[in-house]
Amino acid sequence: MRYPDFIMNFPALDVPFPEDVVQTRVIRSDAGMVAFFTFVQDMILPMHAHKAQWGTVIEGEIEFTIGGETRTYGPGDSYSIPSGVEHGAKIRAGTRVIDVFEEPDRYPVKG
């Protein structure tokens, strides 16, 4: 299922992956960032760390490694990544997630 048009009208993020791999939309405030991700192709997200992140899978599947523990998440599953904890993922094409970042400037907004 595609995100509704009003969400697709939100600005996109300037992420280090091409749009034919992942598409983004975002809402930002001074307190944090809510990002809507659509993974068009299978993708490997390398291990990295930043401030806290919480997310939920809307559609598809993610194999997440968070703090050395690997688990597969599907629709309706949520994950919480504490600040500074290393994490990475294998993400299947067609996956949609909503991620909430503690950092309002985790990724710059395009434009």
Image (spheres, rainbow, N blue to C red):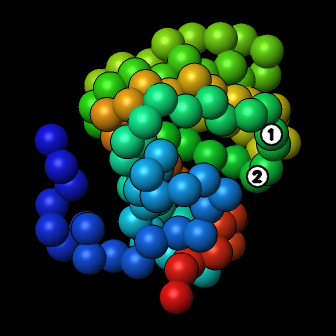
Residue 89 appears in which quarter of the rendering?
A: top right
Left or right of residue 89, residue 40 in this image: left
Q: Amino acid at mark 2?
A: Lys
Q: Is residue 44 above or below residue 17?
A: above
Residue 62 screen position, x and y as percent: 48, 23
- The residue under the point 81% across, 42% down is 49
Left or right of residue 91, residue 103 in this image: right
Residue 79 screen position, x and y as percent: 53, 30
Q: Is residue 57 above or below residue 90?
A: below
- The residue under the point 80% across, 39% down is 48
Left or right of residue 46, residue 59 in this image: left
For discs 2 and 1, the disc positioned in front in the rendered view: 1
Residue 40 appears in which quarter of the rendering?
A: top left
| Nearer-the-camera pick, 4 or 69 | 4
Quarter in which the N terminus is drawn: top left
| Nearer-the-camera pick, 93 or 2 | 93
Badge 2, how many Cα within 10 Å: few under 14, some, many 20+?
few
Q: Amino acid at mark 1?
A: His
| Nearer-the-camera pick, 108 or 80 | 108
Q: Is residue 56 visible?
A: no
- The residue under the point 62% across, 46% down is 53
Q: Which residue is mark 2?
A: 51
Cα gap from disc 2 to disc 1, whole angstroms: 11 Å
Q: Which residue is mark 1?
A: 48
Badge 1, how many Cα within 10 Å: few under 14, some, many 20+?
few
- Secondary element type, mark 1: strand
| Nearer-the-camera pick, 94 or 27 | 94
Q: Is residue 109 visible?
A: yes
